[in-house]
Image (cartoon, rainbow, N blue to C red):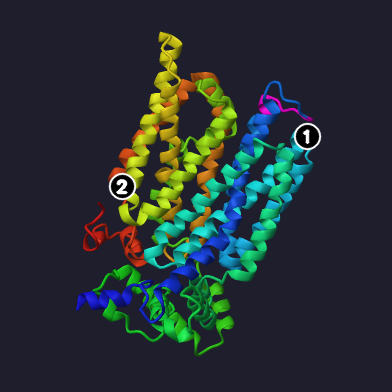
Amino acid sequence: MAEIKSSKIDAENAGTEYNLFRSSLAQIGTIAVQNVMMLGFGMSLAIPTVVIGSLMSDGVSRDMTLTETEASWYGSVLLVCHPTGGLLSGLLQELIGRKWCLAAVSLPQLVGWYVLWRAENAFELYVSCVALGLSMGLSEAPVLTYVGESVEPRLRGPLSSVSTFTIMLGSFIAYLMSTVMPWRTVAMINMAVPVVSFAAIVLLTPESPVWLLSRNRLSEAKKSLAYLRGCVSPDDVEDEFSELSIYAGCNKCVDLEQYADCGMDQRRLSYVKYLQIKTNDATNVDIEALTERNQMDSSVLDTFNNFWPPELNRPFLFIMIFFFFWSFATFIPAKPYLIAVFEEIGLPCTAQWTLVYTSILTLMGTLMNVLTVSKFGKRPITLVSMALSAFSMLGIGMHMVSVTYFSFSCTWVPMVLLNTLFFFSGYGVFPIPWMLVSEIYPTKGRGVASGLTAALAFLMTFILTKSFLILQAWITLPGLFIVYGAITLVGTLYLYACMPETENKTLQQIETFFIGDLGVFDNYHGGLN
């Protein structure tokens, strides 16, 4: 009996009225359309490496130059503007919806590529990075939020990692183009990406049904859900729509007491009851007048709780600690300076081609994540990838020390370790926390929380990127590898102790865990492990 009741509260496990293949195709197609924009994200992330490598390389003819200080700022400005875009995306998601927030990304991205194409000095390079950084920040949170709200649990893991794969694909394309054409030509070609992505999102992407429910636009929400389940009739998704309404706190007809013993804890139950009563009351009065009166009467604490409900605190703390270790484990602070880093390590091929094949390895890793995350789960993939990334960086640092002090040199040792670092960085370290962002936050405040998370994650990355050359001058490159590896190892231990397995769990189960019921997963597929 409990199992039957549990199926009712599962706000994402749809019935079998509609064709499973059509449903999968509709969801995959919608997410693929959105991820055209993420190609531009990956290209934006890669372009400082290309430009800095070109303008600071010896023996290369160029029409402008960069000093080391200018290069440091150019490599970092992109990341410091990303948090601003992330914060804006959190607000825009709630104000205009997930779809139009995604569409808005195209404007700053187009401006950034145009300014870079025409840049004649360092200041114009900075301006291009400001625009590209804003577009990156605006894009990440709504893509992840949309996946979390619109995709069924059986597809959520693979589809939430598609964005990371597309980012890596965009970086790879930018690196590959830079080997055969000047960086200005790369920028000019990249202007096509925001134009195509804007048209695709506006014409082919429905609004998130959960966001529409939160705005009491019930008819539109049902049509959106029907589209995402294979362009079926709204009547075919009636059961799932009712269950989704319960999760979003908008169902006015269901007796919630029947759900008390099937996975909905008392805090969540009380909150949904409150929303249900509030919605029922709204049917008897003018909704706009009620909203205005509630806003006037609310206290400062109530206003803050509406903006940042207590249910966000625990998942936010967990994911921000994860992102702290993520910044070291991905070695992303070195990204703008990778050509110089590869040259100093001493590899058996040129730094430019090392940049290309390491991006291929990262791309292969993210593709492997898409294909295997539903089978192995996020937790094992994360722990293995973090550990191997840590040992790879420690190994590279120790090898460079041995070359300096013991005259031992074997160029294939750092090559193998570097391959391991970039592959497993793409496989588990880079994509998993972004996948978790789409899952761990409750509906109320998800847009703001995901935007703030993305903003703070890249703010940490900016600080580390800006200080990379300073730290390198202080403790040398081998010392940086050792420090990064040691911190990543500590992060592996933290995640072993604190990271739950969210794969194939419903949003309700994940939310219940993070608002205090630490044993909730013990009832689903064997607990945290």
Report the residue at 52% width, 36% height from top. 357
Q: Specify which label sits upstream in the sequence, 2 or 1.
A: 1
Answer with left or right where residue 238 lies relative to residue 259.
Answer: right
Magenta-tinted stretch = 63-70
Which mark identifies residue 121?
1
Which one is nearer the viewer's eye here, 480 or 419? Answer: 419
Q: Which residue extends farthest bottom?
A: 284
Question: Label 1's element?
Answer: loop
Q: Could one spot residue 481 in this view of the protein?
A: yes
Figure quadrant of the N terminus:
bottom left
- Above or below residue 342? Residue 446 is below
- Cα–Cα gap, marks 2 and 1: 47 Å
Which mark identifies residue 345?
none
Density class for disc 2 (Cα within 10 Å; few <14, some 14-19, many ≥20) is some
Look at mark 2 in the image and give the residue it sits on. 380
Which one is nearer the viewer's eye here, 137 or 170? Answer: 170
- Above or below residue 501? Residue 269 is below
Residue type (three-letter) at the residue carrying disc 1:
Asn
Q: Residue 512 at x, y = what percent?
A: 32, 63
Q: Residue 387 at x, y = what percent?
A: 34, 36
Residue type (three-letter) at the residue carrying disc 2:
Pro
Nearer the observer, disc 2 or disc 1?
2
Question: Label 2's element?
Answer: helix
Answer with left or right where residue 196 lies relative to residue 63.
Answer: left
Query: Quadrant of the rendered structure where residue 344 is?
Result: top right
Report the residue at 80% width, 36% height from top. 120
Answer with left or right where residue 427 lies relative to residue 376.
Answer: right
